[in-house]
Amino acid sequence: MQFITDHFMLHNETARTLYEKYAKNMPIYDYHCHLDPKQISENTHFDNITDLWLGGDHYKWRAMRAQGIEEYYITGDASPKEKFRKWAETLENTIGNPLYHWSHLELKMYFDIDTLLTRDNADEVYEYANKYLETHRVTTQSLIESSNVSLICTTDHPNDNLQYHEKSKQQTDFKTAVLPAFRPDDLFKVDQPIFKEFVVELEKLTQKIDSPEALIQAVVQRIDYFHEKGGRLADHGLEEIHYAPYEIEDIRKIFDKALNNASITREEKFQFQTFVLYELSKAYYERQWVMQIHFGAIRNNNTRAFEQLGADAGFDSIRDQENLAYHLNHTLDMMEREGHLPKTILYNLNPVYNDIVGSTIANFQTESGIRSKVQHGAGWWFNDTKQGMLRQMSSLADQGLIQHFVGMLTDSRSFISYSRHDYFRRILCTWIGGLVENGEIPNNDEILKRLIQGICYNNAFHYFKLIEEE
């Protein structure tokens, strides 16, 4: 049975036309992902579909646990074939979950497999896919190139030496630009031991750090290092957005407490977060960087699982927050009133806050010459679904200018998750096509081409300005 047809997710005639004419063949501008730059530079070969498809994928792990699969077959020491069988058993029960669509899209796009994966044909599909990987010599770079990816921005620790980005850059036969993106999450964890560890390692790379002012100077040195290597984006994974006014003496006391392993209060944590965002925004603005903020996750909720498996194992969920509108507006305003609000993308994990984010960003579109300087980022993580994408885009259209939306990002560790861009484009075309057929958008080729191709690629290309047009 063929499930992924040419018309998959394209629910009206206009959608099919828009997809074929304007969306299908656009390149991918992957400005935020978690791909391993080492694997890219070394052009790692995959000879096993389990390693390629299931390794590190907490989306699939969560579904397998819901199926009642023993952890041994998920993150444990089961053989690749055993793990694949258990995933096949799970997949046939994921109808209604985006994993059902994503997985069959991946099988179709990267292995030319049309059949539905079930427990009954798991062994046959496993052997076929592994044979395909071998005979087609499938590698990280071949997957990127076959996906028509023009640019990748990885997610990199401030203390990273970025050697693998340099190696990729020197490979003349690999055309995709692979650039670093600055991810200083440890800098915000002033209430955790990892903050002190971060400062110690940062000091080895930069200068003596004996004050919060010296800390910022050292971080800016690393920003300049990233800048030299082509980095122009920063990303910040924050649990909550809080604006907490401070005096510099407050920050010095908090900094000293952190280095001396003293307890940090919740209010002090948010004062320090406010201070760091304020200082970093100046550095980003001066260098014309884009600042991204992902917020709204509550992590490692299953204590027993965390003790056994560690972080990023699939036990995170959506967080709520009191007075988000106040804190978000004041955070952006403290940068804006001092004239150093950089280009900014906000990603809220809780979809309840879509309209809060949408109405907030409209308050700060004040720099002439930049279209939608502050962006409402694409549906993220638990919103990376059909309904999540539609909710985010509908809210953005209600509150701002969907015409300038920078579109989809991968936000994944998997080299075959580029199929999600195709998924997004099909959903986009169906949504816009429906509005056209309902008479809510003009059926005008010039308008529709600019809209679809802008959201698929062109808006991101012009917003980030990371590569030149060929």
Image (cartoon, rainbow, N blue to C red):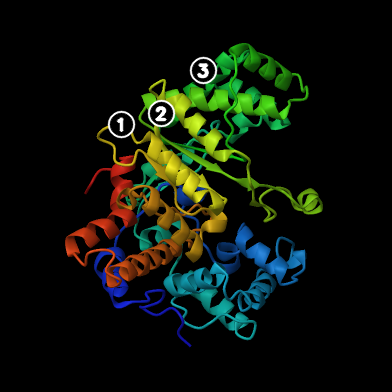
Q: What residue type is labelled 3?
A: Gln
Q: Is residue 224 visible?
A: no
Marks 1 and 3: CB-CB under 8 Å? no
Residue displayed at 58% across by 21% down: 245
Whole-percent x and y of residue 154? Answer: 47, 45
Q: Name the residue under label 1.
A: 367
Residue that extends furthest to the right in the rendered view of this protein: 304
From mark 1 to mark 3, how far is it between C-alphas?
27 Å
Foreground label between 1 and 3: 1
Whole-percent x and y of residue 210? Answer: 63, 13
Residue displayed at 46% across by 74% down: 111
Whole-percent x and y of residue 192? Answer: 72, 31
Q: In this view, does 341 lie above or below 408?
A: above
Earlier along the polypeptide chain: callout 1 or callout 3?
3
Judged from the image, the secondary structure of the residue bearing numbered disc 3 is helix
Of residues 73 and 288, the one nearer the viewer is 288
Q: What residue type is labelled 2?
A: Leu
Q: Is residue 256 above or below residue 347?
A: above
Marks 1 and 2: CB-CB under 8 Å? yes
Q: Name the residue under label 3.
A: 217
Residue 385 got which mark?
A: none
Q: What residue type is labelled 1?
A: Glu
Q: Is residue 297 visible?
A: yes
Q: Name the residue under label 2.
A: 341
Judged from the image, the secondary structure of the residue bearing numbered disc 1 is loop
Of residues 44 and 458, the one nearer the viewer is 458
Of residues 337 and 158, the one nearer the viewer is 337
Whole-percent x and y of residue 115? Answer: 50, 83
Residue 246 in which image quadrant: top right
